Amino acid sequence: MNFKILIIDDEPILRESLQVALNTAGYEVMTSRTGEEGLELFARENPDLVLLDHWLPGINGDAVLGKIKEGKPETPVIIMTAQGSIELAVNLMKMGAFDFLVKPFDLEQLETSSRKDWNGYG
Amino acid sequence: MDRKIRILVAEDDPAFVKMLDDSLEESSSLYDIERVTSGERCLQILRREKFDILLLDHALPDGPGLGWLRRFNEMGVGIPTIFVTAKGDPRLAMEAMKEGIFDYINRSAECAKAFPFVVHRAVEGHSLMLEKVRLQKELIEAKNFLESVAEKAGDAISVVDLEGRIIYWNEGAERIYGYGKEEALGKKLSALLSPDDEKSRTEEEKSLRGLMVRVRKGEMVPNVEVKRRAKDGREIITSMTISPLKDAEGKIIGVSRICRDITNLKKAEERLILAERLSCLGELTAGVAHELRNPLAGIKINTQILSRKKDLPEMEKRLLDSTQEGIEKIQKIVEDMLHFAKPKVSHFKPEDINEVVEKSLAILLAKLKKGNISSVFEQGRELPRVHVDVHQVQQVLINLMLNAIQAMEKGGTLTLRTFSTNGGRVGVEVRDTGVGIPKPHLKKIFDPFFTTKSEGTGLGLSISLNILERHGATIDVSSEEGKGSTFTILFPAESKS
């Protein structure tokens, strides 16, 4: 079965580019614009990895992360944020985030991060 | 006079005394008369009692009246005196006048008749004289009082005549403007204190001219803000109160200026305004930076996906490269903006400022060498430690030094100096011999995004200012075009605890 990645981000350019990048790398990718939509997809599709924007319209990244961790704590969630403070990173890691990427990050960073993921969980 | 006028008559001619008595008879209730017939006796009584008027004959049995008069005056018992001369002796009368008598009469019946009138005139004259002496004393005291108040006032007080020449210059003016009295008096005030640069001079002169028109109409103009230049070239901002100076008739003969030095107040005010503006701008900047980072993240990944394609044609490859370069630049700007908006958490520790400066300088040695710039570090000895975040202060110093290096494209000297003030503050000076900063730019260099360079975000100095403010430190700049710039940082005095 294909490795499924869920991207939750309200920035269309980033959604698009991540989708292309990850598709090219051979993953199955689904995207959503909001946390609400993202949680629905998560429940329905049961992805292997979530790339989650921290700052979302509607319910924010913290809440989405909390919900995911409640339901399926074993699913790794990588947080993407435009706000690169240490406090935020530490907080999110405590809440169970698997990794933390400050926008704009490199493709390689993303790959390293998701590969880390396979080794740990896959 | 509400009491009797006491008259002492020194006259040995009984016939004339009789005539005087007769003339005073009519209103005898007004007078109290004592009679003596010799100078010696007269002196005795004068030393014992007080009289209002002395009638003194020019020839007493024990000597000439004039001689006695001199003696009385010498002994300090002299009183207003009416001199009696022989009939028609103007020379003697003149001499007696010189001795300070009040009046004289001839030993004649007519004069005896007019005696009450003469007495009154003498009494009145004497009290007028006393009044004059008292007023003179008061005037001198008032003048002294005003002079010492004006002289010692903390403000600069100056007076100019109608030609604009300085006729008064107090100690405050000497201190604030740096010109001594001898340098200032007689000079044109405008020549002495007008700002150096053409633009502010014209501005100041124009606004002052308008004010002077009002003052010359008799109006007082309080608290106008006026820029002045001190002897050492420093720009001073004063709050000036201008008033017309009038003579006794109310005619305007000059203009006085009371000037309070509000330079520091103004600077503090400007700093506060700047700080407020920076904090507003900080919020805005943070928002913009965040918004930029999102699409930027997408664009960056896009270009990276594309750049992995092996078979990209040459032109596409070049376009992609420059796009990626652009993205790096934008990313750097965003980082700077965010740093400006939300500085890192500070870790304050007592540090040796010389070490901090040394380390910052060491980082730039290669750049200095490459730019053909020599560096001098004048280390202050036994400086108090400063309570700072060493990384942040280094960032500030490096920023200042980089600016200095960029100002010295053709090489030059970078001088760093550390020192302490009497108040226990520690200072660092960064001085270059570069192109200098044009005056109109001086006010703006700490503004975020103000830059004259093609490279750079214009955030360096505003971030520095931000950092220093968090340290309770101040930064000042002085610069002369073509000669160089000096930035001076002053850290607060360390508390003794």
Image: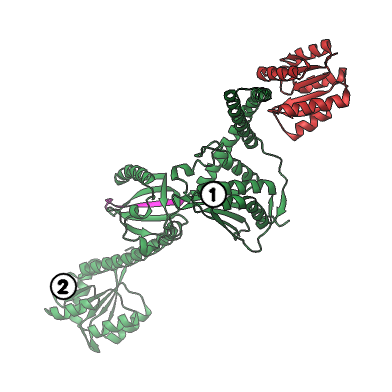
Q: Is residue B463 left or right of residue B110?
A: right
Q: Residue furthest bottom?
A: B62
Tell me if residue A20 comes above or below residue B84 in the rendering.
above
Chain letter, green in picture:
B
Q: Which residues are magenta?
A: B249-260
Answer whether labels 2 and 1 touch (C-beta < 8 Å): no
| Few, some or many residues within 10 Å of mark 2 (<14, 14–19, 20+) | some
The residue under the point 72% across, 33% down is A85
Chain letter, red in picture:
A
Query: Does label 2 or label 1 sit earlier along the sequence?
Result: 2
Host chain of mark 1: B
Residue kind at label 2, given as amino acid type: Cys
Q: Nearer the viewer, residue B398 or B204?
A: B398
Query: Residue B23's spot in the image, x, y percent?
Result: 20, 70
Question: The N terminus of chain A is located in which quarter?
Answer: top right
Determine which residue is flagged by label 2. Answer: B111
The residue under the point 59% across, 25% down is B314
Query: Residue B293's spot in the image, x, y percent?
Result: 65, 27
Q: Is residue B253 magenta?
A: yes
Q: What label sits on residue B404 in the rendered view?
A: 1
Mark 1 element type? helix
Mark 2 element type? helix
Tell me if residue B168 comes above or below residue A69 in the rendering.
below
Q: Is residue B169 left or right of residue A34?
A: left
